[in-house]
Amino acid sequence: MISTKEAVIIAVNNLKELFADQEYDNVLLEEFEQDSDDKNKESWLITLGFDVPNSHKSPIQNIMSPDSKRKYKVFKISSNGDLLSMKIREVQTI
């Protein structure tokens, strides 16, 4: 089983590779969890958060909206370091 740190590095590298043509910054580790499926195959769930520019539609939205929006992706990394999946992590706002 790879370490937590190795799984995070793999997730960050995959984010950089998969989103190379998109603008983002402020990548942070948000969550991590060791997981096992129904076949007892262990993996890591790594949640990364990052900021993307807000595309404003009108001058009033420019004033009322922040310059960027936070997005989250969950990367599932196998015990040997392979990327198994990437999913959108929705966060509820109050």
Image (cartoon, rainbow, N blue to C red):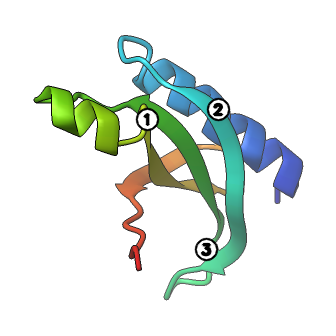
Front residue of 27 and 62: 62
Which amino acid lies under the numbered mark 1 shown in the image of this protein? Ser
Residue 68 image label:
1
40 over 72 or under it: above or below: below
Q: Residue at x 43, y 35 (%)?
A: 68
Give neighbour class at mark 1: few <14, some 14-19, many 20+ (Cα, 10 Å): some
Q: Position of residue 50 (x, y in %)?
A: 55, 40
The residue beneath circle 2 is: 26
Q: Position of residue 76 (x, y in %)?
A: 54, 57
The residue beneath circle 3 is: 41
Horizontal side of residue 44 vs 52, given as left or right: right
Q: CA distance from mark 3 to mark 2?
A: 32 Å
Which numbered disc, 3 or 1, marks the residue that appears first in the sequence?
A: 3
For discs 1 and 2, the disc positioned in front in the rendered view: 1
Give neighbour class at mark 2: few <14, some 14-19, many 20+ (Cα, 10 Å): few
Q: Residue at x 48, y 24 (%)?
A: 24
Which amino acid lies under the numbered mark 3 shown in the image of this protein? Lys
